[in-house]
Amino acid sequence: MRNLDDVENMVYDAASVTAMVIAAMSRTQNVRLKEIVDALVEHGHAFLKQVKLTDEEFEKGLDFLRAVGLACNDKHNEVVLLADVLGLSTLVTVLNNSDASGRTPGALLGPFYRGDSPQYAHGECIACEYSPGSPLFVSGRVLDTKGEPIPNAKVDVWQASPVGLYENQDASQPDKNLRGHFYTDGEGRFSFKSVRPAGYPVPTDGPVGALLEKQNRHPYRPAHLHFVVIAEGYATLVSQVFADDSEHLNSDVVFGVNRRLVGTFERHEPETGPKSAVDEPYYTLEYDFVLAKGTPTYPTPPIK
Ligand code: BEZ
Ligand code: FE
């Protein structure tokens, strides 16, 4: 038999497995990639040791991940959904958006951002002509951390319908309904009309839904509008504004609610208030976004 004294990389015990894997990856040239994958292996191995994962559980876990991948297509992203319900997306957002600058907090992008939304002029409506629902008038400013207006900022918005469905989930809505972008004017202002969104359950017909059920968790998000705000010389803001009177504000299934992101959805009776020409009950929302200096980035749409 061969003398094995010179074969160092063999399994002796649990610690030797981790050491062997880290050594095998030691020539990774990209320093950041090495840092990330080394930590992933170390923490992943520590996790397996902590829970003493059985063979059967390992197979189940791998099968679950396979099912998550298989549930993805151009119109649905179950991987993002999994990251969202496990709080990974919110944690990454908080880690990258928390400083004392006073900028608006970020919130997760979610799986329904499509990019390439239609451009609208100030005050235009992002809901198609026959979208039922209570009118909602949104206005605000994009400001820097000193309170100065940022002109020509791109304000990209998307939202669910009054029955809680994004247009890509709902055959009755036209393509890109309730999605649009605007550019702020010289005073940093934007405004648009829409219909009031409802809270909604995240998709539950895939493996992530099955997990939520096993965890005895409800699948609901409070009513909200999504925003991506992009301006030259500023860090991009990916965020959401939540309706203050919404159910589930206290138990968002994807952990997105931050006190500063709760907006006042003010109800007005017909023919009263700032839009007195409206002959049915309607809502107004005023919300200012504050951007910190930085380099703009462009989020990758999770679906087409
Ligand atoms: C959303 O707000 O669009 C969303 C976020 C996470 C999971 C599902 C939907
Ligand atoms: Fe949403």
Image (cartoon, rainbow, N blue to C red):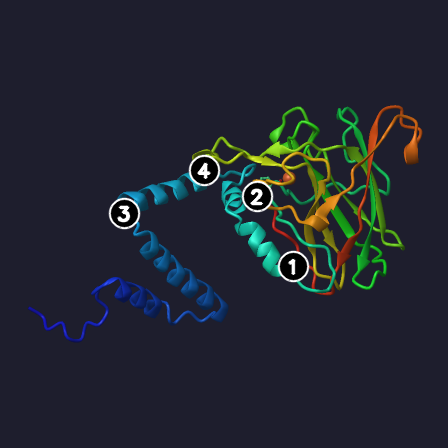
Amino acid at circle 1: Asn
Amino acid at circle 3: Thr
Residue assigned mark 1: 97
Callout 4: helix, strand or loop?
Answer: loop
Q: Seen in the image, is 13 located left or right of residue 207? A: left
Identify the residue at image location x=60%, y=31%: 169
- Which mark sits nearer the N-terminus, 3 or 1? 3
Identify the residue at image location x=87%, y=27%: 269
Q: Residue furthest front?
A: 250
Marks 4 and 1, how far apart at CA: 29 Å
Q: Position of residue 146 (x, y in %)?
A: 82, 64
Disc nearest the viewer among 4 and 1: 4
Q: Position of residue 223 (x, y in %)?
A: 68, 36
Residue assigned mark 4: 215
Q: Seen in the image, is 145 located left or right of residue 254? A: right
Q: Is residue 257 above or below residue 203?
A: below
Callout 2: helix, strand or loop?
Answer: loop
- Which mark sits nearer the N-terminus, 4 or 1? 1
Q: Is residue 106 above or below residue 214?
A: below
Amino acid at circle 4: Gln
Callout 1: helix, strand or loop?
Answer: helix
Identify the residue at image location x=71%, y=33%: 197
Marks 2 and 4, how far apart at CA: 14 Å
**Label 4 crowd bin: few (<14), some (14–19), many (20+), radius 10 Å:** few
Amino acid at circle 2: Val
**Label 1 crowd bin: few (<14), some (14–19), many (20+), radius 10 Å:** some
**Ligand 2, what quadrant?**
top right
The answer to whether the residue bearing label 2 lies less than 8 angstroms from the nearest atom of ligand 1 is yes
